Every structure is written in C-alpha cells, then in structure tokens.
Image (cartoon, rainbow, N blue to C red):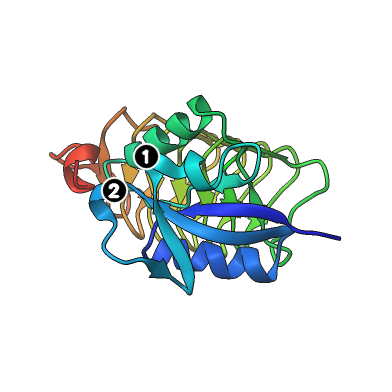
Amino acid sequence: MSRIPLVVFGNNTFASLAWYCLTHDSPYQVVAFTVDQRFLNADTHEGLPVLPFEDLEASHPPEAAHLIIPLGYHAINSIRRDRYLEGKARGYRFASYVSSRASVWPDLQVGENTLIYEHAIIQPFARIGDNAIIRSAAHISHHCVVGDHAFVAAGVTLGGNVSIGAQSFIGVGAVLRDGLAIAERSFIGAGAVVVSDTEADGVYVGNPAKKAGRSALDVTGG
C-alpha cells in the first residue's frame, strides 16, 4: 500500500520530532519540509529538501501532498494558527497524528493538523480541536475539551470536564483541577496547580496558581 505524501512545516526540533514519528508510525511519507522564505537558511533538513512556503504549490500542490504544521507555542500559538489558516485558504489538506503508543479510544474526536504523542492518555468523551498539540504523557481526563490551536505540554494532568480555550498553552507537568474553564490564550506555567478558572490572555504560575502581571503574549515572544 502506497503511503500518502506529506510536507512538514518547519526546520527545527519540533519539525524533526514530527518527521521521525510520522516516518515510523503513520501512513504518511514525509517528502519535504517548508518554511517562510525569510527562514530558509539551509537547502535540506533531515536529508529532505526545505522549500519556501510562499511557493509550495510549484512543487507540492494541494492535490499532490498533505501538509502538517507542528510549530510550538510562540506568540501564544498564533504563528501555528496563522500558518494553518493560510494553508487551508490555499487548499491544502492537513494530516493529524495520533501515536500508536498513546492510550485513546476508537471514537475519539480529533481535529485536523493535530498531533498526539506517545503515552498520552485521553479518556472517553474527551474532544481535541483543530491544530492542537498534545505532548507525551499528558493525561486528558473524561469529558475534557482541548480547543483549537492549543498546546498541552508533556506530563500535564487535566481533571474531568476541563475546558481548554483556543490558543492556550499548558506547561510541562501542570495540574488542572476538574471542572475548570481555561480561557482562550491562557498561559499556564510549568508545574502550576490550577484550582480556579482563568482569564483570557492571563499568565498563571505557582501552587496554587496565581495570575502574574504579564500577558500570555509577552511571555511567549509576541
């Protein structure tokens, strides 16, 4: 059975991680990487060509290859959001990746351009939106909703019925009590223990987590 051609956006470690997992654990064959022209500082990455995103149709048009954008949380996930929306507007179809080593149920709802890495646990009735990243060993409990463009880092634990707003970032090892509503573009620091709802664009750190004085955009390089 032939594999599906796929172009990975990026030329950094996030792109390398996605390339490795997709190569060894998916029906896709990565055929190239792509980046914005101003970041095109090498012709190859992981032995494959790196192409300018602005001209990707010339070599890999939407009807010939899928696209995946595994960018990180820079500018509170807005860079990944913007490139995803641009790719959709240009007609590209998006891959999603759920590791065969993740613990998920057959009826899990996963959006497009979403990556779920090894040993993540996603319980029944949870839903994962479009363009989201769930890193290794995250625990997404029952009836949780992870919104579009969100990033859930390694080792995060969500209690049941937690709602993660669009573009939010949940840092390594954070713990979120059951029933919480995490507002859009929230930044939850590594190791934070969140026991109450958050406000949009807020930064929350500590145990119990408290709102810091800076905005989520400030702390993520916006």
Q: How many marks?
A: 2
Q: Which residue is mark 2?
A: 37
On screen, 171 above or below 109?
A: below
Of 184 and 21, which appears nearest the observer?
A: 21
Residue 4 at x, y = what percent?
A: 72, 53
Residue 177 at x, y = what percent?
A: 49, 44
On screen, 109 above or below 120?
A: above
Name the residue at the front extreme: 58
Callout 1 secondary element: helix
On screen, 44 above or below 70?
A: below
Q: Amino acid at mark 1?
A: Glu
On screen, 221 above or below 154?
A: above
Taking the image as drawn, is residue 196 in sight? no
Q: Which residue is mark 1?
A: 54
- Residue 181 is left or right of residue 22, and the answer is left
- The tag earlier along the polypeptide, 2 or 1, is 2
Q: Residue at x 34, y 33 (%)?
A: 185
Q: Residue at x 38, y 55 (%)?
A: 171
Taking the image as drawn, is residue 143 in sight? yes
Quadrant hosting residue 153: bottom left
Q: Residue at x 31, y 66 (%)?
A: 42
Q: Quadrant of the N terminus?
A: bottom right
Of 77 and 186, which appears nearest the observer?
A: 77
Q: Are marks 2 and 1 in contact (CB under 8 Å)?
A: yes
Residue 122 at x, y = what percent?
A: 67, 51
Q: Amino acid at mark 2?
A: Gln
